[in-house]
Image (spheres, rainbow, N blue to C red):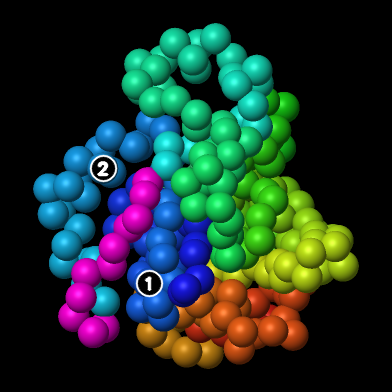
């Protein structure tokens, strides 16, 4: 059979997760998706109504098939961890089995196993606040939603100063990159699983628009990166497909930049 991939963090057709799903589907993988519980309804409705049909089109003209969409909130491992107000929230009450452990169990029941895990989600409630003004809760929330994985998406704010990428998101990405290395060792030794992360350039996704300065970052990259073109989500999707494929069989613990080379610049020009 073809490979089976679970991609966590898709709720529309604009972000990196969607592009990664498409690249994997084009390479023959079966696609399972984890969608944030509050966004599930609108995503499934749009999917059913054909709103994504144009962007679901693969290079061979067929439409990407999504075998199953699971509700997911990556901040909670078990039902016991979910606070009352979230349980009672009407955007959550309509769904069930959406904590990380329950989703893993459901996938196991439905399909037995997966071959590829993609973490393409982040949430920094205080991302628009400087780190200096970030609350403990905001900081911990950013770390909780935004680190841990098998292939994941990171951002250069982990290692260089990017003013405006606040709320502990820079810290979350630093944790993610460190975890990528340690997990590559542990999962590699124990299960022969490879763990990598893509450090992506700026993309005007839904999540990025919440930060508030994404258009400025896109313009900055266009002006300063070695490759002067807008970064497309597909370029990140294709790299992800490569990294999870046998072509990358010796690559693990790596941070791979897909940013038109911007990371290599020392000064703006
Ligand atoms: P996106 O909005 O398409 O994806 C983020 C997803 O995370 C959304 O679907 C959202 O519903 C989901 N999500 C948030 N909290 C969640 C939770 N608790 N449980 C489950 N899902 C949750 O935006 P994107 O920019 O494509 O983000 C994907 C990844 O790429 C993120 O890790 C982001 O930090 C990273 N990234 C983005 C950029 C950029 O410029 N857009 C640059 C570098 C890295």
Query: Taking 172 as reference, is 226 above or below it?
Result: below
Residue 35, given in percent of the width and then of the height, sits at: 42, 43
* x 57%, y 33%: residue: 102
Per the model, the C-alpha gap separating discs 1 and 2 is 19 Å
Query: Residue at the spot x=12%, y=48% of the render?
Result: 49
The image shows residue 23, relative to residue 106, as above or below, that is below
Residue at the image point whose x is 41% and y is 61% from the top = 31
Q: Main secondary structure of the magenta part?
A: loop
Please name the residue that numbered disc 2 is placed on.
Answer: 44
Are dots 1 and 2 in contact, CB under 8 Å? no
In magenta segment, residue 191: no
Mark number, residue 25: 1
**Residue bounds of the magenta highlight:** 59-69
Q: Position of residue 69 (x, y in %)?
A: 37, 46
Q: Is residue 77 left or right of residue 184?
A: left
Q: Secondary structure at mark 2?
A: helix
């Amino acid at each position: 059979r073809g490979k089976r991939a679970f991609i966590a963090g898709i709720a529309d057709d604009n972000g990196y997760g969607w592009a990664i799903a498409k690249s994997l589907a084009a390479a023959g993988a079966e696609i399972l998706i984890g969608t944030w519980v509050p966004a599930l309804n609108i995503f499934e409705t749009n999917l059913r109504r054909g709103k994504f049909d144009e962007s679901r089109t693969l290079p061979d003209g067929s439409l990407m098939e999504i075998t199953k969409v699971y509700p997911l909130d990556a901040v909670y491992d078990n039902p016991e961890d979910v606070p009352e107000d979230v349980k009672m929230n009407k955007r959550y009450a309509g769904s069930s089995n959406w904590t990380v452990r329950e989703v893993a169990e459901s996938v196991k029941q439905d399909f037995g196993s997966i071959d590829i895990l993609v973490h393409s989600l982040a949430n920094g409630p205080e991302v628009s606040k400087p780190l200096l003004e970030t609350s403990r809760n905001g900081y911990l929330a950013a770390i909780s939603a935004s680190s841990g994985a098998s292939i994941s998406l990171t951002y250069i704010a982990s290692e260089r100063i990017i003013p405006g990428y606040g709320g502990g998101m820079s810290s979350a990405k630093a944790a993610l990159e460190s975890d990528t290395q340690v997990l590559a060792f542990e999962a590699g030794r124990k299960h022969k699983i490879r763990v990598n992360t893509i450090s992506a350039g700026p993309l005007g996704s839904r999540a990025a628009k919440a930060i508030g300065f994404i258009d400025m970052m896109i313009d900055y990259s266009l002006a300063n990166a070695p490759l002067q073109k807008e970064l497309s989500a597909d370029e990140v999707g294709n790299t992800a497909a490569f990294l999870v494929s046998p072509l990358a069989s010796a690559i693990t613990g790596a941070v791979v930049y897909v940013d038109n080379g911007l990371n290599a610049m020392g000064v703006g020009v």
